[in-house]
Amino acid sequence: MVVRFGEKYKQWNAAFDAGMAAALGKSLIVLHGPDHQHALKEVDAAALAVAETPAQVVDMLAYVERGVLPG
């Protein structure tokens, strides 16, 4: 599951979804900018990966799916 945090998104909904994914043992990628880093440190700790851009998420998923590293 990819959960995106940002100014345009409902933070409480994203936090709830991330918590549910963690509680259910689902794989979690968290996407947020550096301005949210401190506030989301506990959510980041529960995630398998943290990204700052959508392109980083795409690279992560490509690696998981096909074993292809970016570049």
Image (cartoon, grey):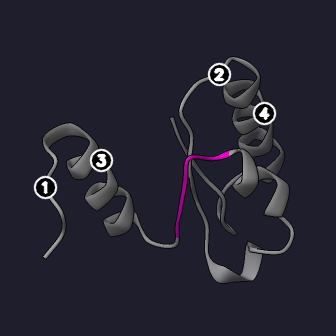
**Circle 4 crowding by C-alpha within 10 Å: few under 14, some 14–19, many from 20:** some
Residue with the mark numbered 1:
68
Give the mark nearest the N terminus, 1 or 2: 2
Residue with the mark numbered 4:
19
Q: Nearer the viewer, mark 1 or mark 4?
A: 1
Q: Residue visible at 71% across and 30% down?
A: 22
Residue with the mark numbered 2:
25
The three-letter amino acid code for the residue at tag 1 is: Val
Q: Tell whether position 49 is magenta.
A: yes
Residue with the mark numbered 3:
61
**Circle 1 crowding by C-alpha within 10 Å: few under 14, some 14–19, many from 20:** few
Assign a secondary structure to mark 3: helix
Q: Residue visible at 84% across and 45% down?
A: 12
> Can you give x and y, in whole percent of width and height, for residue 67 in the image?
16, 47
Q: Is residue 65 above or below residue 55?
A: above
Q: CA distance from mark 1 to mark 2?
A: 25 Å
Give the mark nearest the N terminus, 4 or 2: 4
Q: Which residues are magenta?
A: 47-51
**Circle 3 crowding by C-alpha within 10 Å: few under 14, some 14–19, many from 20:** some
The three-letter amino acid code for the residue at tag 3 is: Leu
> Can you give x and y, in whole percent of width and height, for residue 40 in the image?
80, 62
State the image quarter where residue 28 is shown. Answer: top right
Q: CA distance from mark 3 to mark 4?
A: 21 Å
Q: Tell whether position 12 is magenta.
A: no
Assign a secondary structure to mark 2: loop
Give the mark nearest the N terminus, 3 or 4: 4
Assign a secondary structure to mark 1: loop
Instruction: Tell me, yes or no, whether the two marked residues, 4 and 2, touch with CB atoms within 8 Å.
Output: no
> Can you give x and y, in whole percent of width and height, for residue 56 in the image?
36, 67
